[in-house]
Image (spheres, grey):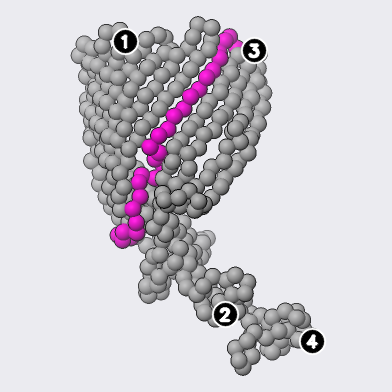
Amino acid sequence: MNQLENFAGLTEKISAAYVQANDRIGRARGNLGVRFVRTQQDVNIVNEVTTLKQEYYHDANGNPLNCPSSGVNVKGSPCVPGDFQYRPEELWNVRTFEPGHRSRTYTNILPSFNFVYTLPHDVVLRFAASKAMARPNYSDILVLGNLTHVTPAFYHDRAQFGARLPGWYGSGGNKDLKEFEATQFDLGAAWYFQKGSVIGVGLFHKKVENFVVPVTVTQDVDVGGQQVTVKDFSTIGNGRSGTSKGAEFYFQHTFDMGFGIIANYTLNKTSTTDVLVNGQVVGQSNLVGSAENAANLSLFYQKNDLLIRATSNWTGKVTQGLVSGLTLYQEPYNQINVNGSYKFTDDLSLTASIINLTKSKARSHLGDDTSLRLDSLVYSGRQYYLGLTFTFGP
């Protein structure tokens, strides 16, 4: 049975209906449709509230008492000689729980249109327009909140050991997150100049609303019917409205001797928009997870039962979230992976991979004025995988 202190639950009911018409006339084909979606959500979640109070027994002047050689404190309980005299934990580390609830119903109308026209010489033109939505991830909604109140009395006792300044601190999910919505247009052309080979370009324009932004902010939170200001509160916010527009170029070709190449490059220009938490603007951010430039290059050799592939994945500066009003960026990152396989028989094959051959490190910093404000440095090392697969049966 769920106890109050560890309970988070969501009930979601989804009703959907759609209609679609397909048609083909000569070199042209396409479809037109619309989808109706109604979502009912009921969210229950709990914040754990920890209040840190006076930890030690004090003398008449307010100074912490040391445990005497007798090993007995002023209340007659055992203590460690030379150490401080600790009050019972339940007196200075007080835990309570604050339940929260939200019910919401929303309806989305999602039209879509796709058109394809085939020109002579295997050139294909494509156009698409649609509206899309995505509900917030459960992991962003159903996070058990954790609030800590550092009282002046606790700070007085623990300041010498690096205690935080008096105040409220914490983290938690956001049960008021709205659904992500996007109105998107795509136009592309591709030339299939040989079997297994293509060169193409695509243009895109997307208007997005309510995209998810991880944030760390100073936030007012209701605790027991009172508003308290929580410092460095880590949660999830919604970006109000932004645009993403750009172009993608791609190429794929396999030569007669078995060597091949796959390459693509994406240019993505995004706008800056307000970020909201509980209806309050807490800063501005570009689209999270977006990079202005990204490219991938894959070289391979495939002949008979042998396949060898080396892939370089490069991403420019990526927006990751918002921390105390500063945008969090992941710096440009490139990683090379190598993998291969050999098929001995129809039933027996060998696979091998080297992940992060270049031993690349992911580095994030705060603000766009300098890269010296380091936030994180992640190194996963070079990883090796070897596998042998044997298929049983007919």
Q: Amino acid at mark 1?
A: Asp
Q: Earlier in the sequence, mark 4 or mark 1?
A: 4
Classify 10 Å Cα crowding around label 4: few (below 14), some (14-19), many (20 and above).
few
For label 1, the SS is helix
Q: Which mark is residue 315?
A: none
Q: Residue at x 42, y 25 (%)?
A: 264
State whether residue 154 is above or below residue 360. Answer: below
Q: Residue furthest left?
A: 25
Q: Residue at x 54, y 7 (%)?
A: 257
Q: Are marks 1 and 3 in contact (CB under 8 Å)?
A: no
State whether residue 308 is above or below residue 168. Answer: above
Classify 10 Å Cα crowding around label 1: few (below 14), some (14-19), many (20 and above).
few
For label 4, the SS is loop
Q: Residue furthest bottom?
A: 60
For label 2, the SS is helix
Q: Are marks 2 and 1 in contact (CB under 8 Å)?
A: no
Residue under label 2: 156
Classify 10 Å Cα crowding around label 2: few (below 14), some (14-19), many (20 and above).
some
Residue under label 4: 70
Q: Amino acid at mark 2?
A: His
Q: Amino acid at mark 3?
A: Thr
